[in-house]
Amino acid sequence: MMNKRLIGSVLAVMMTVTAFLPSGSVAAEGGADQAEGGTPEERLYCVGSVSKVYVTAAVMQLADKGLVDIDAPLTTYIPEFRMADPRYVQISVRMLMNHTSGIMGTRFTNMELYGDSDMGGYDDLLASLADQRLKADPGEYAAYCNDGFCLLAMVVERVSGMSYTDYVVRNIAGRIGCEDTGTPVNMYGYEDKAQIFSGRLPHDYEYCMALGSGGIYAAASDVAEFGSSFWTGDNRLLSESAKDDMATRWNASSDNSYQDGSGLGWDYVEQIAYEREGVRVQGKGGDITNMHAHLLVAPDNDISVSVLSSGGSSTLNRLVAEALLDVALEEQGITVDHSADDIELAGDIPEEFNRYAGSYALYSLYGTSIAEISFPDSSYMQVDIEGLTRTETHKYMYTATGGFAEVNDYGMVKNNAMVVYFEDGEDGRTYIKGSMDMEYPELGTTTMRMYVGENMEDNPVSDDVMAAFENYSSCPWVLTGDTYSSASYDSPFMFFKTVDDHPGYVIVYVMGQSRVLKIDDAFNVSSFTTLPSSSNRDLVDGCVTPGGAFLCSNGMKFEPLAMMPELTDDVTEIELTDGCASWYRIGDETAGTMINVNRPDSSMICVYNKYYEPVYSTHVTDASDQIDLPEDGYIVFAGQTGGSVLIE
């Protein structure tokens, strides 16, 4: 049977299909230059977490050869792997691939770098994990875990005797003819990189140094070719049994659709809309700060779709991929209906729901917050959510399916409303499940099913302990421990918030996300949620050190902004130390003025306004050496040890 291909779309799409277009037909990648003869010059993108399918394929190759037993303990292949939790010895290689290891989540320190390919963060992973506990019993439930896939890259290295990069280039990309695939190790400085923008300004290229979880770089056609290796009958990379294992849901014996539907490496291996038409699909999305990806494969229909973009999100890329998949399926006589079910309201709330009133840790796309749930006169459900600066009130009405849907001030179901359901857990906790069909005009609908909340138990602490955290909440904290090229300086502020009605807990806002933590004592906080889905991803514990810094278990280090000096006219030189950023407050003396700077190449300067928004960065291409200083703003200097920034 003839393989036929299409390249196209402004988002840099590559499809590999059968019986779709005549072999060799090509449409140009949007925005790409045309080589002589009209052939498009593809760009190199980071595929983000689509990289997890690559490292899983590498491990499964080794399993096909009998070199890895995926159900063996991880310590079989990494003997020095340790954690501060005796259960770590139960973690198997399979659990890393299907996100059920119980590892907290992600080591963020120096994970994404601008114009830099320092492997220090990857090299420090084992030492970081040695100080961490587990959030759940290994194998208990799936919750997205980046660190597990970095460990898989190490497994590949230990078993193969090759660097992970060399293994991918030779045994993954090399076997299927993909010349534009690699990692930051071999693709650093690649000429035909995708353009990156901050706002509308060209920006330094971004490298993800978490090689196993997000560090694959490739052209769109290479990613689609990789996807085609999962077609039924294609054994260029893997045996049929290995591919079937990857495409099996981790909890295949369960009918709980609110738990993650991940296979090995894949985000999902079942989709209801496609299953109704007898089509098997498996897919994986990926995001880093500025680049996004989605790979969608229908293995029995010989269709592979890759959508890579600079800007946007993997969710939007998925919708484009599904639209293109649907076109290919229509050519095979298959029509897929993605329409969402209507939400029907049902009137008064049964009295039995009053027992669910109380405090909850509630998850959203922006993290976890404290929510107070009540049922005024049993006529509706009220949800009061504590935000950083105010409390938001949401109103839900009872539905015919026994859930609650958010409504507007007129009692009408909101667009893209989430329907939530209460569940009495076997562990005695009360959980909240959420179901939402989000419609994107002109693109399609994406469905989310997951656990989104659980009840909070009383956590009494002394007045002195609460006073300590109220003091921590009195000013912002700033990131100081990352290297100069870290993308985390795009959003380096952390805030604590205590809530009078919920003593014993604190809300921490960091990198645009919030997390409710339990206060253990005057210096320590810990994660406590047990939500059995990816809403429980990337958990952290933290402690305030004797020196006054806040250390997160994911490796990030923050210091109070109030302790930072003021930038005055007599500050003329900033000595740089790697991993120790120098912060200054912009006071009345320098606010509204301009400074000229002379800095080393291996350094950065970022400026933020009083609203903590970035207004200047040396990571912007050709950034000026003249810097305007905003009123009540902040400035940070970072660079390699031995260098210095001169100011005049």
Image: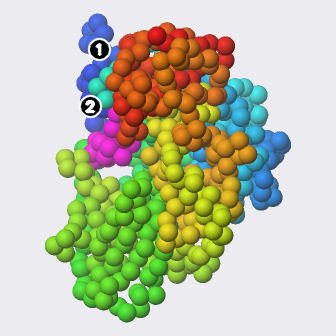
- Tell me the quarter of the picture where residue 160 sits: top right
Residue 320 within the segment the image draws in magenta: yes
Q: Residue at x 49, y 65 (%)?
A: 499
Report the residue that reaches farthest toward the bottom: 351
Q: Residue, x 55% and y 73% (percent of image)? A: 456
Instruction: Give left or right: position of 410 versus 464.
Output: left
Q: Main secondary structure of the magenta part?
A: helix
Range drawn in magenta: 306-326
Amino acid type indicated by mark 2: Ser
Please tell me the numbered disc located at residue 9: 2
Q: Write down the residue under mark 1.
A: 33
SS type, badge 2? loop
Left or right: residue 534 compared with residue 297? right
> Cα distance, mark 1 to mark 2?
14 Å
Residue at (53%, 18%) from the top-left corner? 571
Quick check: marks 1 and 2 in contact, CB under 8 Å?
Answer: no
On screen, residue 529 above or below 582: below
Relative to residue 601, is residue 617 depicted above or below? below
523 vs 200, nearest the viewer:
523
Q: Tag 1's secondary structure?
A: loop
